[in-house]
Amino acid sequence: MGKVLVIGAGGVGSVAVHKMAMNADIFSEIVLASRTVSKCDAIAASVKQRTGVTVPTHAIDADDVAATTALINEVKPDLVVNLALPYQDLSIMDACLNAGVHYMDTANYEPKDVAKFEYHWQWDYQDKFKNAGLMALLGSGFDPGVTSVFAMWLKKHKLKTIRLLDILDCNGGDHGQAFATNFNPEINIREVTAPARHWENGEFVETPAMGVKQTFDFEQVGEKTMYMMYHEELESLARFVPEMERARFWMTFGEEYIKHLTVLQNVGMTRIDPVMYEGREIIPLQFLKAVLPEPSSLGETTKGKTNIGDIATGEALNGSGEKTFYIKNICDHEKAYEETGNQAVSYTTGVPAMIGAAMILTGKWKGEGVFNMEQFDPDPFMEMLNEHGLPWTVEELDGPLPF
């Protein structure tokens, strides 16, 4: 039904390409490009072995707008799926505008020199994409992505309004390493060490990084400590669900992760400003990334499950007063690895990337301009989650979280 160019050959890119190849009725051709073409070739070989589908590969520096434009013009895709680093969102969007091709990503733009991720840089492209008659879909991962679709599904089918929203992200997996991150270490550590922000009474309230924590008993995982953090879907949800009084994002971390991260912070290894080392500038966090385990290597050893979902409280659609619903997905690391060769953190982002691309190629989601997940009908996306490895459940709770 459509041809895609996927840029990015990490774990998420691997999952997305595998799942696209498993849906040849939607993805008639898949091309994969990355700065390191050997990573693309390894994914293509796995896809060929598992599905029989051939995936052509290319080397590309996605920071180079002219080169990326040339590649898009050469490949002639219907859609570019950006699964590269958030730093590269704007350059790939520029290339899509130059080549006249639709755009999609899984995480919003973040400048290299400031650990600050916000949508305004990409929202500023609204007129450019609209005037070009093109569509840009932002944040089609799990969080952001599925968590926003979950909220809009609840608002369509269960709640007239959403007054309180908590997003809970639990990774109950164990990879056997003393310290490792389950996705790009540089992005992960920048995210975790940034000040926390949550939405309350019409504004964002900032608190120290990892300064607020609670315990929660996650189904099929158990009781875990979760920390309040800032995540970009809070910004788009605050925009598209304006009645929300409070929205928070929580993520679980084990004691060993926190201990190692604290030490790394204390000795300056999480810094993103340059330091001089033997006569040349280096970025400490980028050096740390180079010595940490590659996230894509963790799939074979990771066991356990992820549990990610929304707890929303608001006025019930049926007029029965205020209700609270919990909607979530539980994903098994070992099953994800068996299917695609990647652990569940990559799987839970790569599958929604495939589904978001499918929404565009099939015309179920369409428009001209820059769009967030909250702006579209959640039902076809939710149906594909159930069909393609991320089944969800919804239950009514007695009330909102007590904290």
Image: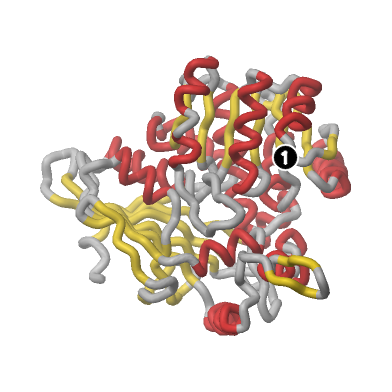
At which x and y percent is residue 99?
A: 68, 20
Q: Which residue is drawn at 55% across and 50% down?
A: 110
Nearer to me, 288 or 23: 288
Between 385 and 198, the one nearer to me in the picture: 198
Asked whether residue 2 is in view, the answer is no
| Left or right of 286 in this view: 124 | left
| Apparent side of residue 63 relative to residue 255 in the rendered image (left or right) | right
Which quarter of the rendering shows the N terminus? top right
Q: Residue at x 51, y 73 (%)?
A: 253
Is any atom of residue 321 visible in this view?
yes
How packed mark 1 is, by other alpha carbons closer than 10 Å (few <14, some 14-19, many 20 or more), is many
Query: 153 or 5, which is in the foreground?
Result: 5
Residue at numbered disc 1: 62
From the viewer's perspective, is residue 135 above or below residue 61? above
What's the residue at 49%, 30% (across, down)? 125
Please name the amino acid that badge 1 sits on.
Ala
